[in-house]
Amino acid sequence: MYGLELLKKGIIWRIGSGSQVRIWRDPWIPRGRSLRVTSRQGRCRLRWVSELLDIDGKDWDFDKLARLFNPADADAIAKIKLPARVSEDFLAWHPEKTGLFSVSSAYNLGLSLQNDQTQEASSEAADGERKIWGLVWNGLKLCREALPTRRAKFIRKMETSALCTLCDREAETGFHATVACPQAKCLRKAMREHWHLPEERLFEYTGPVWLLLLLDICSEEQRDLVKLLLWKAWAVHNNITHQSGPLSILESVHSLLALQAPLSLSRFGDGQVSGWKPPPQGYYKVNVDGSYVAQIGEAGVGVIIRDSLGGVILTAWRVVFRCSGAVEAEARACVEGLRLAAQWAQGPVILESDCARIVGTLQKKEDSWSIVQVKRECNSVANNLAHLARRNVHSAVWLGQAPACATVLIKSDCNLPSS
C-alpha cells in the first residue's frame, strides 16, 4: 500500500463545530484503525456530526448517541472532547498525537496494515476476540532484524541517526529494543515477580539466531512467556518513541498478565498447578475481574461469590459504558463485587482480584472483610463473566447458579480438600 491510499488510511477529522463532517462516511472517531462509524445507518436521516450535539453545541447529546449507535461507537464518540470555543473542523494525521504527518509514522502504518492483511485469516476469532498469536510474533522478524527499528530506517535513509531515542547509548536494533534497552530490562525485572522466566544471563546477544537459542533452552511454558514479553517490550518501546499508548511499567505488567490468560498458562517453573482455593469455613469468597479492549473501547465486569464448600451464591456480569481504561474496569469490578456481597453474603468476605494496582490501593483491614491479589488463573470464572458482559453488552445477576459458559470453569478450578 503506497501513496494516496496509505494517506487515506491515516487521515482523520478533528471535530470543531461538526458542520463539515459526515456522520456515516467520514473518518472522525479516534480509535485504533476503524476511524469510521461501524453502526448501521438504517432509517436515520441525520447527516452531519453537528446534529449529534446538544442545543448549545458545546457537548454531545448522549441520549441521541445511545439511540443511534452501537455501544462501541457511542462510547468512542462520547470520549471525543469538544473545543470550548466555536472552531472549524479540520483534517489531521491520526497516527501522530500532534496531528502532523511524518514519514516514520506513515512507514509504521504501512507495515502494520501489511501485517494485518497477511494475518487476516487468523488474527480474529469467530466471536470478535483478537487471538493471542495474532499479537505475539513468532520471532522470525526479530531474528531477521525486519522490525521497523531506527537502525533499519537509518539504513534506508529515513532517519538521521540509528541511536535509540530512549537511552541514547547504542543503535536501536531489534535486540536492543526488546532486551538490552533499560526500559525493556525494567519490564523484564517487573515481570519476574509474576512469571518464571529464564535467568537474566541467558538474555544476551549471541548472533543473528540469539532468539532461537534462547527459546531452545526454555520449557514450553517459558517459551510462550518469553515471546509475549518480547512483544510487549517492543510495543512499549514504540509507544514511548511515538508518544502514543500506555507508557508505564505498571500498565505493561497488568496488560501482560491479562494477555497470559488466553494462553492457558496455568503451570509455572516449579511444576505446581495454581487455581482457585475455597475460603475458610464460614467465609465467602468474591472473585471479580474487569475486561477492557482499548481498540474499540468496550468494557465489562464479572463477579462470582462462593462459600467454603465451593457452592455458588451468585454469578453476575455487567457491561460498562464510557470506560477510560483497564484499571477503571478492574475498579468497577471491585465496586460491583462488594455491592453484591453486602447484599447476599451472610458472613465475612474475602475479595480477590488479579489487578495489583487496585488491590494495593484497597488493601486495608476492615472488620472481617479482606482484599487479596491472586494470579489470573485463580480468577478464571470472574474473567470469563467479564468477557461475557463486554461481548453481549448485557448485565445480569444469577442467584445460586451460573451460566453454561462458566460452569465448566467452576468445576475445574474448585480445588476442594478431600473429606
Image: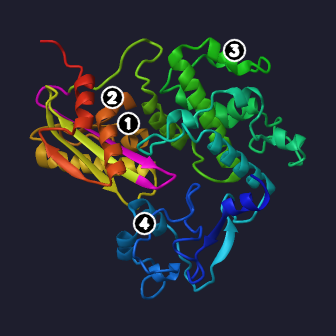
Q: Nearer the viewer, mark 4 or mark 1?
A: 4
- CB within 8 Å, label 2 to label 4: no
Q: Mark 1 sits on what residue?
A: 354
Q: What residue type is labelled 1?
A: Asp
Residue at 69% in and 18% down? 212
Q: Which of 65 and 23 is in front in this view?
A: 23
Task: Check disc 1 and report its element: helix, strand or loop.
Answer: loop
Q: Spatial distance from mark 3 to mark 4, Cα to Cα?
A: 48 Å
Provide the residue span drawn in magenta: 279-298
Q: What residue type is labelled 3?
A: Leu
- CB within 8 Å, label 4 to label 1: no
Q: Which of 376 and 401 is in front in this view?
A: 401
Q: Does 412 sit above or below residue 326?
A: above
Residue 261 lies in quadrant: top left
Q: Mark 3 sits on what residue?
A: 213
Sequence-wise, which precedes: disc 3 or disc 1? 3
Task: Check disc 2 and report its element: helix, strand or loop.
Answer: helix
Sequence-wise, which precedes: disc 2 or disc 4? 4
Q: Which of marks 3 and 1 is in front?
A: 3
Q: Does 122 sit above or below residue 87?
A: above
Sequence-wise, which precedes: disc 4 or disc 1? 4
**Label 4: few (<14), some (14–19) or many (≥20) C-alpha neighbours in 10 Å:** many
Numbered mark located on residue 378 in the image: 2
Q: Does 231 sit above or below residue 108?
A: above
Q: Can residue 375 be seen in this view?
A: no
Numbered mark located on residue 130 in the image: none
Q: Is residue 57 left or right of residue 319?
A: right
Q: Spatial distance from mark 4 to mark 1, Cα to Cα?
A: 29 Å
Q: Spatial distance from mark 3 to mark 1, Cα to Cα?
A: 33 Å
Q: Is residue 230 left or right of residue 365?
A: right
Q: Which residue lies furthest to the front in this view?
A: 43
